[in-house]
Amino acid sequence: MSALLFPRLHRFLAARLSPEGETGLHLTVGSVLIVCAAWLFGGIAEEVVNHEALTVLDVTIAHWFHANASHPMTQVMLFITHIHGMAGAPILGLMLAAWFYLSHQRYWLITTLVALPGGMLLNVLLKYVFQRARPSFDNPLLTLSTYSFPSGHTANAALLYGLLACWLWVHHRSWRARGLIAACACLMVGVVGTSRMYLGVHYLSDVLAATASASAWLAVSITAISTLRRRRQGRGRGRGSVRQ
């Protein structure tokens, strides 16, 4: 009945929820993820700028980690943080890009080349926009002179493991496998973020904001490249039908 009363609305919704087409379900899901991640980042940023309740929790958690640090755990956290740093993260990204190149997955390669460098650049720009000082301790485990908000290492991890999780998600139809993939990606991002808080160079809000901003940029990259791929495929099919 609703389809008869509102035919245009019905066609619009059907097109947005269709798994096919260049403006179908992938664009709908991508747009929702972008808006949600951006909204979450905005909420965290507002808390930080206005020094609201989240910043109080930031300080509490930062001092708890510093008070309970131990030498063995510090070495583990340093190892984790260095792997996902400004040197380690590009190497991991290049390894992923090389895999996509050697396996002839052109659009995933393009997504990698757009998402990872672009997300890192976005993080740097956000740091200079907010210019938040890092946590300060009398005997710091690690000292850095750059800005704190949002966490670059956490953003790198969210971009890398998020992209890898999306690729694995597409190639596995089992929802059990997909759930495991999503859980593993979240765990890896959480471990990296925890290492930054443990070492006393980031607050909880830095880590949460980095995850949100990186997720938003990753959603933009994947959605844009997927739309481009579908558009070209549609044009290819159209030329094929004309030739026939």
Image (cartoon, grey):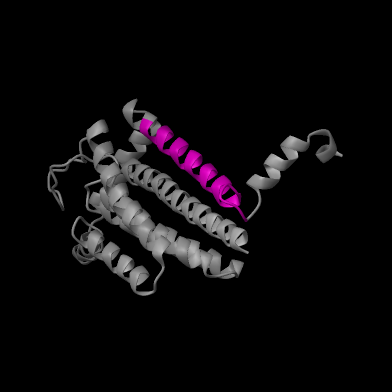
Q: Residue furthest front?
A: 243
Q: Residue at x 57, y 47 (%)?
A: 23
Which of the two residues, 160 or 240, is positioned nearer the viewer here?
A: 240
Task: Residue at the far top: name it.
Answer: 50
Which quadrant holds residue 108?
bottom left
Give the residue drawn at x 47%, y 52%. 228
Query: Horizontally, is 84 left or right of 238 in the view?
Result: left
Q: Is residue 40 magenta?
A: yes
Q: Residue drawn 38% across and 61% down?
A: 161
Left or right for 215, reference 227: left
Q: Residue at x 39, y 46 (%)?
A: 217
Q: Is 1 displayed left or right of 45 in the figure?
A: right
| Quadrant for the C terminus in the image | bottom right
| Residue stretch in magenta | 20-45
Percent position of residue 25, x then y: 60, 50
Looking at the picture, does residue 113 appear above or below residue 171?
above
Give how far across and how far down residue 9 sits, in percent: 72, 36
Total labels drawn: 0
Find residue 92 and report its image quarter: bottom left
Query: Farthest right residue?
Result: 1
Q: Name the residue nearer the viewer: 187 or 70.
A: 187
Tell which of 77 and 83 is nearer to you: 83
Please tell me whether residue 73 is drawn above or below residue 153 in the rendered image. Answer: below
| Residue 91 point in image, percent of width and height | 23, 64
- Residue 191, percent from left and from top: 34, 59
